[in-house]
Image: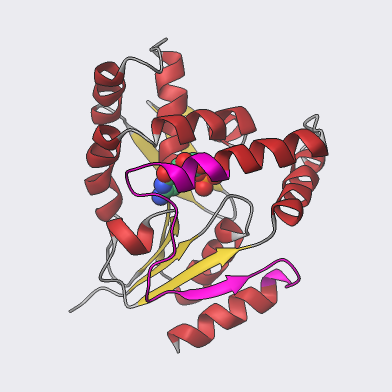
């Protein structure tokens, strides 16, 4: 029996995580937050005190990456048994993840780890290259985006709610730098699959986005 896959790609802060989790819950499907794998690797690299220029050592850390995901209302991630959920969301982690994610050898190691999430009854996969590289045969693909200002405002709100210090202008700059790095890299750049549905969530509620994606699946 073919395993259905829905891919949701797009830049950071477009609402992919929230939308993907809600849809996975509604459909009873598995959920892959591929960004959290790159983020976890960034934390593992930092813990191992490996320099970002030492590609071979980063690849070794990626090969040995021991992650556990607990998918409840919020995704809990453990690295070597230690709960790293709180560190995952930091913009510093995202920035480092995006530098590591530009390395083709790292992407190659992480490819299979991501494909292993494809299991019955189905999978919602969220990231940058889910519809283009990891699951090119997925029958349902979405490219979810929003303006950099809107995405920065959402990120700012999330951080303030978590009582983490934040500066809106700095977040806009970081988001734009990360977008540029993700779109301009040679391997698996952030790009819309030719067969994906384009959704701009700038002026949409989460519920409206979820409804539009569910319509696509129906
Ligand atoms: O989505 P999230 O912000 O958690 O991703 C962190 C970084 O990981 C991204 O900026 C991107 O560089 C990288 N990433 C990737 N491919 C994916 C998911 C994330 O390159 N499928």
What residue sits 60% from the left and 27% below the top?
A: 92
Query: On the image, which quarter does residue 137 sit in?
Result: bottom left
Q: Nearer the viewer, residue 113 or 12?
A: 12
Q: Which residues are magenta?
A: 179-206
> Is residue 146 visible in this depiction of the protein?
yes
- Spot occupied by residue 104 in the image (x, y as percentages of width and height): 28, 37
Q: Nearer the viewer, residue 123 or 192?
A: 192
**Could you tell me residue 199's position as x and y percent?**
58, 73
Number of numbered callouts drawn? 0
Q: Quadrant of the C terminus?
A: bottom left
Colour scheme of the rendered structure: secondary structure
Instruction: Find residue 72 and report its horizontal and vertical position in percent.
Output: 53, 54
Q: Look at 32% across and 15% down and name the residue there.
A: 54
Q: Nearer the viewer, residue 114 or 169?
A: 169
The reply to whether the magenta stretch includes residue 200 is yes
Examine the structure image and report whether residue 127 is included in the region drawn in magenta. Answer: no
């Amino acid at each position: 029996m073919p395993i259905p896959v829905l891919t949701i790609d797009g830049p950071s802060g477009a609402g992919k995580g929230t939308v993907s989790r809600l849809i996975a819950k509604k459909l009873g499907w598995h959920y892959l937050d591929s960004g959290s794998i790159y983020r976890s690797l960034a934390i593992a690299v930092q813990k191992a005190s490996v320099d970002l220029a030492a590609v071979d050592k980063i690849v070794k850390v990626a090969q040995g990456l021991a992650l556990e995901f607990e998918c409840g209302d919020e995704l809990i991630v453990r690295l070597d048994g230690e709960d790293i959920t709180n560190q995952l969301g930091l913009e510093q982690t995202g920035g480092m993840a995006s530098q590591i994610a530009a390395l083709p050898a790292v992407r190659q190691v992480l490819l299979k780890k991501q494909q292993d999430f494809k299991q019955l009854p189905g999978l919602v996969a969220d990231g940058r290259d889910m519809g283009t590289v990891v699951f090119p045969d997925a029958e349902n693909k979405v490219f979810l985006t929003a303006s950099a200002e809107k995405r920065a405002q959402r990120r700012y709100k999330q951080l303030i709610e978590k009582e983490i210090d934040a500066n809106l202008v700095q977040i806009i700059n970081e988001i734009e730098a990360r977008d540029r790095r993700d779109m301009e890299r040679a391997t698996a750049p952030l790009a819309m699959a030719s067969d994906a549905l384009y959704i701009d969530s700038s002026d949409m509620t989460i519920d409206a986005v979820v409804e539009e994606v569910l319509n696509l699946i129906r």
